[in-house]
Amino acid sequence: MGTNGTTCPGPMKATSNGVFQGENPLEHALPLLILQICIVLLLTRLLAFLLRPLRQPRVIAEIVGGILLGPSALGKSSKFINTVFPPKSLTVLDTLANLGLIFFLFLVGLELDPKSLKRTGKRALSIALAGITLPFVLGIGTSFALRSSIADGASKAPFLVFMGVALSITAFPVLARILAEIKLLTTDIGKIALSAAAVNDVAAWILLALAVALSGEGSSPLTSLWVFLSGCGFVLFCIFVVQPGIKLIAKRCPEGEPVNELYVCCTLGIVLAASFVTDLIGIHALFGAFVIGVIFPKEGNFANALVEKVEDLVSGLFLPLYFVSSGLKTNVATIQGAQSWGLLVLVIFNACFGKIIGTVLVSLYCKVPLDQSLALGFLMNTKGLVELIVLNIGKDRGVLNDQIFAIMVLMAIFTTFMTTPLVLAVYKPGKSLTKADYKNRTVEETNRSNKPLCLMFCFQSIMNIPTIVNLIEASRGINRKENLSVYAMHLMELSERSSAILMAHKVRRNGLPFWNKDKSENNSSSSDMVVVAFEAFRRLSRVSVRPMTAISPMATIHEDICQSAERKKTAMVILPFHKHVRLDRTWETTRNDYRWINKKVMEESPCSVAILVDRGLGGTTRVASSDFSLTITVLFFGGNDDREALAFAVRMAEHPGISLTVVRFIPSDEFKPENVKIEITEDLIGSGATRLIDIEAITELKAKIKEQESSRSNSDSESQIIYEEKIVKCYEEVIEVIKEYSKSNLFLVGKSPEGSVASGINVRSDTPELGPIGNLLTETESVSTVASVLVVQQYIASRPVGISKNVTTEESLVEDSESP
């Protein structure tokens, strides 16, 4: 009972007894919170889906969703706001949102590696400092204009600092997401932007801590000084006391073993304790969680396992609540009159001018091209969650009023929304390469021009590495120096999970993902094993192996492969099959998305493509060159793809450990194909010219064998290349001939063989990308072999997109043709 005779509303009960007992669930905290969460998730995910064609980050949808639920849109209805977001429920909502934000800021801290900041290049550091200084100065100038008009009562020093910080922030996680969406994550411009944004992020948090220390209510300057010094003392305590303890826990979590639940609970407890201490000091609970994340050891298995356990619940469920909590405070209707809208334009202009111009000028001074400088300027202008945190703290501390808060939120939306379209408009990295610059798009053309062969191997995990290394060894030859250059591309999925941005932070200079550049005894991650494998092979051979990384959603990662192949001017891209062999020699699907990737690369690749069906080529380990030996068989029926397979095999035969057998199938006069469906296509029109080219390729092969035999006439060794012609009468004889070579280590076959013999091979399979012969050796029991198979498709500019005409599918391919 109040002193004036009115009744104060009591606290909400947690749960209700249900509608059948006459209670309204929306008047109780738990059911109302559940409804709020459901509405928030539904609205934000719907907006994210609608904004996806515009390639906007999810943070835009979450900010806009929060504003729509607030007094700017739906909240204008008093019935809606009092039913779904009544004032008495906001304390519970804000508490849960801030609890989720604490753990999310811990994850953000995990993304920042202090050791990587030490390695930041001079260009990135200069760009970061320019991107902070000029906007901060303009923010202070803007604050004077705002204080003289719509922010009369704002405290001078805190208001100046808050405005400066708000305009100078670059959102590191949002920037990394945008770079991934527009395929710039692993490029030079992407690395510069990420490094500069990381420096900017750390500086922004330091400035924000200063602003919070200055914004205490009714506090003297001496109190603010004590708050700031206590915060510095807390950081030092975390570095010298807390960090060694966390490192000790991390050492007890070896790679490949599950993390003890006690260690996870202990770490989360440390995060909460640190948040309590910083709140006790008077800074903000978020700072404690962020500091623990920054000092957390990045190497090893523990950090990765911790992120996987925490982030889905935090970023998917709790974090959108914070955007709604912010949106409920944002009332766009407070921006009224020409003066207010003019100030909005002024704030947006100063925010863009400071970031873009400052970044562009310094970039040009550092000799960055103009288009890249402009792109860097737009990228560094990205805002996001940290911007909202600054604004909400400023509003809660009474530094920002409702009108200024709404203006700053709209500024954050506008600057982030414009980033992607402007970067795509000014920077087009693939535009400079013309067709004249890229000539040797096939192995056959490369052999004729006598130029070094350039290959790109794609791999999904370390399981693919031994086979790739052995295939590189087989391809390198010995006759010519610098005969082969190889790019090894690691395919990594960029999911909707926020910690996928960790992969961006783990991209080394050589393009491979990493936790930490420094190697430690306990750091035996798969990424390090990949680095060691390729580095060892490079030193033991004359082959230049350049690791690369493609970090994209599965729906678009084929674009990264094709664009990289064109930039590197490769003659062939070699992809892993989407299935792997189990111990019982049966096939198991690794992931069906990889099959879709293979099909899209085959359709869109700027060079030849091969799919490697691996059954353990050359064993599971790399062997010395002197001991390396493989038996390779080429099944030659005719056509462009078969000639490409033959050209690659002949290149391999230069290696002294390779024994190559070329089997050419010739139909007898009484050959009768069975179950052949003739399709009249443009390919059949040019079949005569194709036969002539096939004969020419076989003639060159015979000449090479004779030359090889004459050069070895004085030795007892046999020729490395054996050519055989098999005259067959029917399909069954083809099978019997192939069985004779079942003990080979590797078969090379064309995806779409041509000729009357190939047209009689009708294989029922659900993998048409392997072609009829590839499926015969892989998916059927007609040929029992443990040999690996390399299915080759030659690049032809006018090649029609579709399924091989000799393969009958057993299931519909509609599902596979859609984006995953």
Image: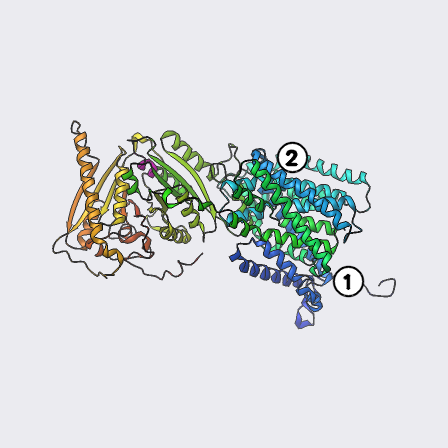
Most extreme residue toward the right is 4
Most extreme residue toward the left is 669
Image quarter of the N terminus: bottom right
Query: Disc 2 marks which residue?
Result: 239
For mark 2, does the 10 Å Cα neighbourhood hold few (<14), some (14 to 19), or many (20 or more) residues?
Answer: some
Classify mark 2: helix, strand or loop: helix
For mark 1, does the 10 Å Cα neighbourhood hold few (<14), some (14 to 19), or many (20 or more) residues?
Answer: few
1 or 2: tag closer to the N-terminus: 1
Magenta region's main secondary structure?
A: helix
Residue 244 versus residue 106: which sits nearer the camera? 106
In this rendering, position of residue 610 left or right of residue 382? left
Residue 203 appears in which quarter of the rendering? top right
What kind of residue is marked 1?
Gly
Nearer the observer, disc 1 or disc 2?
A: 2
Classify mark 1: helix, strand or loop: loop
Residue 317 position within the rendered picture, expressed as x and y whole percent measured from the top left: 60, 55
Residue 144 position within the rendered picture, expressed as x and y whole percent measured from the top left: 75, 47
Q: Is residue 472 above or below residue 381?
A: above
Q: Which mark is residue 10?
A: 1
Residue 39 position within the rendered picture, expressed as x and y whole percent measured from the top left: 61, 63
Residue 739 visible:
no
In this rendering, position of residue 662 left or right of residue 103? left
In this picture, which residue range is highlighted in magenta?
470-479
Image quarter of the C terminus: bottom left
| Mark 1 and mark 2: Cα distance apart in space | 45 Å
Residue 647 versus residue 527: which sits nearer the camera? 647
